[in-house]
Image (tube, rainbow, N blue to C red):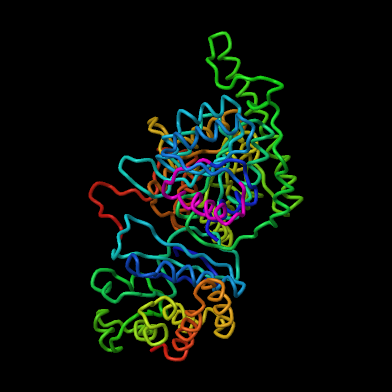
């Protein structure tokens, strides 16, 4: 075992520099914090360039978190950019019964094929379509965040929705027009996505 | 909140007179957040954006000598570039408080965490306090203001770059008013702008005087311990959070132990918990204050163990060990019943350190105890041999 024991949920994010995987990871930490959890959200830093693969991590627990290492056997893996499937072994160390949450327009069969015949749990979220429909632009963060909450069950959905409204109201004080859009993206994702 | 934001928040609450700073990864966010606070009118600090770390420390020295409360933040090569001035600040007995987000020194270039920057500065005359997490670096920074002013020594408040500086986690902040009251107003004993009592700062130290200045500095460091504990006591009265020179974790009946500094102490604690559940008598000693070196406290904490592994997140290139091992082993020399002691170099340049790695360390200690001796004491965690491929 590489990390914590007990009821800690560990999540690994894969994205590309500039796409917001790190931001989504920190948002999840914030949402879990609002829910009264102990949280960690941290990116793995390297020589970062826009578009280069990046990894970020969350630990969420009811107990104090002291481990400060990366996560090697995640409970769930989130892939913000499906083109990473060609270059990064996103399934590496994913626990038995863990969920792969992926931003994609593809069908379940296609993604399983792209993952070399992956048989485990899968949650597909078309974050581009959802954010375009609700926000008018491709901002995948809010749908990805909502998909992780829905798929993992790590937070209570109703409380999460309430907390995120507050968070958006705080964050977008200077541009209130995007608050409803983000809330709609969040709700739409919670309604739409499911684990296959 | 991240460790960097925590430090910047502490700075806002302290509202120092002067902050001279130059950005360098991974401490850059500290002056970034702080200058936002300034732009928003939350502090009335004189913020001096300089062209180098050499100048950042010079600004702090000038301000502190003039009688101001001065703070800064840096990392890695930035700290290295301050080198000359670190000694000037310490020998001039200026209580500057500096946040260091620890990062490897260049060669090869790395932005990853290790302790080579601050360990290199260990003999510069600064008090050094290290943090395991964002809560501790926040608490330490607030305490450092008073520790520096009580001892008239500058204080380095260290945290692990990226690991805690950029990692967000839960934190308990103290109310602004309480911090303000805790740090109070700085009243220097002597200061340059005091026209009543003219004063020279940083003059030439001729041979008849130089050594006495150094002796006085050494004495100040020897006596700094009592100020550190007094401030910790006052801090505990305000927050309920206890701080000392070291933290003993499950040491009560420990037969083997690790000595560790910084964020990896948290990872090692999880390992200790696991092994304790398996019935193994293991413990951990975390060093919070490295300067002054807590020799007496360490010896007491390690008096009953059979073997100890000292964890060094920096090389010393002395051919024998890392810097922490040299001091811990030296502290143990006069013990009647010394434990076996080994050194592990780990986590250089951001190399990740896991619970499993600490399991390996404890397993090796068991072997040493069984054998009744150690073979090579200068060891490494997770370093590849020539033909091994990097782990992706």
Point out the stretch of residues depicted in magenta: B20-44
Above or below: residue B278 compared with residue A166: above
Quarter of the picture holding the C terminus of chain B: bottom left
Residue A56 x, y percent position in the rendering: 41, 65
Quarter of the picture holding the N terminus of chain B: bottom right
Tell me which residue sits at (69%, 55%) in the image: B176
Residue A157 x, y percent position in the rendering: 54, 84
Q: Nearer the viewer, residue B70 or A75?
A: B70
The total of numbered circles placed on residues is: 0
Q: Tell me: B327 left or right of B319.
A: right
Tell me which residue sits at (67%, 47%) in the image: B243
Above or below: residue B317 compared with residue A166: above
Q: Nearer the viewer, residue A55 or B250?
A: A55
Q: Is residue B302 magenta?
A: no
The image quarter containing residue B303 is top right
- Residue at far top of view: B208
Q: Is residue B40 magenta?
A: yes
Q: Tell me: A129 left or right of B195.
A: left
Tell me which residue sits at (26%, 74%) in the image: A83
């Amino acid at each position: 075992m590489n990390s914590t024991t007990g009821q800690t949920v560990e999540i690994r994010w894969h994205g590309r520099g500039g796409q917001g995987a790190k931001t989504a990871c920190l948002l999840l930490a914030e949402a879990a914090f609002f829910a009264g959890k102990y949280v960690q959200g941290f990116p793995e830093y390297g020589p970062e360039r826009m578009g280069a693969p990046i990894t970020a991590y969350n630990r969420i627990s009811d107990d104090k978190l002291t481990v400060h290492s990366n996560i090697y056997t995640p409970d769930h893996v989130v892939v913000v950019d499906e083109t990473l499937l060609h270059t990064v072994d996103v399934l590496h160390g994913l626990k038995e019964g863990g969920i792969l949450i992926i931003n994609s327009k593809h069908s379940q069969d296609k993604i399983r094929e792209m993952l070399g015949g992956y048989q485990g749990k899968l949650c597909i979220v078309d974050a581009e379509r959802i954010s375009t429909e609700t926000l008018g632009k491709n901002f995948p963060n809010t749908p990805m965040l909502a998909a992780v909450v829905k798929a993992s069950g790590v937070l209570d959905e109703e409380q999460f929705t309430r907390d995120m409204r507050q968070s958006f109201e705080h964050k977008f004080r200077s541009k209130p027009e995007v608050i409803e859009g983000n809330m709609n993206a969040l709700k739409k994702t919670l309604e739409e996505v499911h684990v296959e | 909140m991240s460790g960097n934001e925590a430090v910047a928040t502490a700075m806002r609450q302290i509202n120092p007179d002067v902050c001279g700073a130059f950005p360098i990864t991974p401490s850059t966010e500290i002056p970034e957040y702080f200058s936002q606070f300034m732009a928003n009118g939350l502090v009335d600090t004189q913020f001096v954006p300089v062209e180098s770390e050499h100048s950042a420390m010079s600004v702090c020295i000038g301000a502190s000598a003039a009688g101001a409360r001065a703070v800064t933040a840096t990392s890695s090569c930035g700290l290295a570039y301050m080198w000359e001035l670190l000694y000037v600040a310490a020998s001039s007995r200026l209580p500057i408080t500096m946040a260091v987000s620890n990062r490897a020194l260049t060669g090869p270039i790395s932005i990853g965490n290790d302790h080579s920057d601050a360990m290199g500065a260990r003999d510069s005359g600064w008090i050094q306090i290290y943090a395991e997490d964002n809560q501790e670096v926040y608490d330490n920074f607030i305490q450092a203001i008073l520790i520096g002013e009580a001892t008239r020594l500058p204080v380095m408040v260290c945290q692990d770059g990226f690991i805690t500086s950029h990692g967000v986690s839960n934190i308990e902040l103290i109310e602004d008013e309480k911090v303000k009251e805790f740090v109070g107003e700085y009243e220097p004993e002597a200061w340059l702008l005091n026209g009543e009592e003219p004063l020279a700062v940083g003059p030439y130290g001729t041979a008849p005087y130089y050594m006495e200045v150094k002796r006085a500095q050494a004495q100040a460091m020897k006596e700094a311990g009592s100020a550190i504990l007094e401030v910790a006591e006052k801090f505990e009265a305000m927050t309920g959070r206890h701080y000392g020179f070291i933290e003993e974790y499950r040491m009560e009946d420990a037969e083997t132990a690790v000595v560790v500094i910084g964020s990896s102490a948290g990872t090692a604690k999880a390992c200790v918990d696991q092994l304790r559940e398996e019935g193994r008598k293991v413990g951990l000693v975390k060093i919070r204050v490295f300067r002054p070196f807590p020799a007496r406290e360490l010896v007491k904490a390690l008096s009953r163990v059979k073997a100890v592994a000292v964890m060094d997140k920096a090389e010393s290139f002395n051919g024998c060990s890392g810097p922490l091992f040299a001091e811990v082993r030296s502290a143990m020399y006069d013990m009647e019943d010394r434990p076996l002691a080994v050194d592990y170099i780990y986590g250089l340049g951001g190399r990740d350190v896991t619970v499993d790695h600490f399991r390996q360390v404890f397993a090796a200690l068991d072997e040493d105890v069984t054998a009744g001796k150690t073979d090579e004491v200068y060891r490494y965690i997770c370093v590849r041999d020539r033909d091994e491929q990097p782990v992706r």
